[in-house]
Amino acid sequence: MAEKESTLAKIDRTDRKILEHLQKDGSLTNQQLAEKVGLSPSPCLRRVRALEEAGIILRTATILDHKKLGLSLTAIILIGMDRHTPERFAAFEEQVSGYPEVQECYLITGQSADYMLKVVVPDMDHYHQFLLNHITRIPGVSGVHSSFVLRRVLDSTALPLGYLS
């Protein structure tokens, strides 16, 4: 347990507030953020920069409305690999990392698959072409099982911070 504790970031209550507000709205100005967490702008900016330097804040992103951009089909794909070798996995991961349609990729256990992908495309025709022209052509892919999202019930990028003091 001591090893795990040493890898956890040390943040205080104010840092936690900063992170919670930035997760909700990364476009807050430093002035707005400082007011929300009860700091003056200079100390607030120093804390944000320290959180960035510590690698806690990795980047700031803009969340787009997928439907308004015509990306109305989300698929969850379970992928089986023919061989479980580091080289085969590395080649697969490098290949899927280059596809903008792939939003998430996880190496998983507990399923009859090795990878789970979240893919976003305009429609079923585009999905079919993506599957046939990209996924099934990756060396080592031995099985593909697709499920389609009917409705996004919860779609969050925020991490739970309540367990941090």
Image (tube, grey):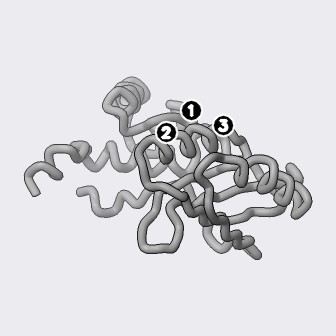
Q: Is residue 8 above or below residue 47?
A: below
Q: Earlier in the sequence, mark 3 or mark 2?
A: 2
Indicate the amino acid at tag 2.
Leu
Residue at 14% across, 44% down: 6
Question: Could you tell me which quadrant the C terminus lies in?
Answer: bottom left
Residue ID for mark 1: 29
Q: Earlier in the sequence, mark 1 or mark 3?
A: 1
Is 102 placed left or right of 18 in the picture? right
Considering depth in this image, is 163 or 115 the residue closer to the camera? 115
| 3 or 2: mark nearer the eye | 3
Q: Look at the numbered discs 2 and 1 and tell me whether their residues touch, using CB distance below 8 Å.
A: yes
At mark 2, the secondary structure is helix
User: Residue pushed farthest right?
Assistant: 125
The crowding category of the residue bearing disc 3, from other C-alpha atoms within 10 Å (few below 14, some 14 to 19, many at least 20), is: few
At mark 3, the secondary structure is loop
Residue ID for mark 3: 98
At mark 1, the secondary structure is loop
Asked if residue 68 can be seen in this view, the reply is no
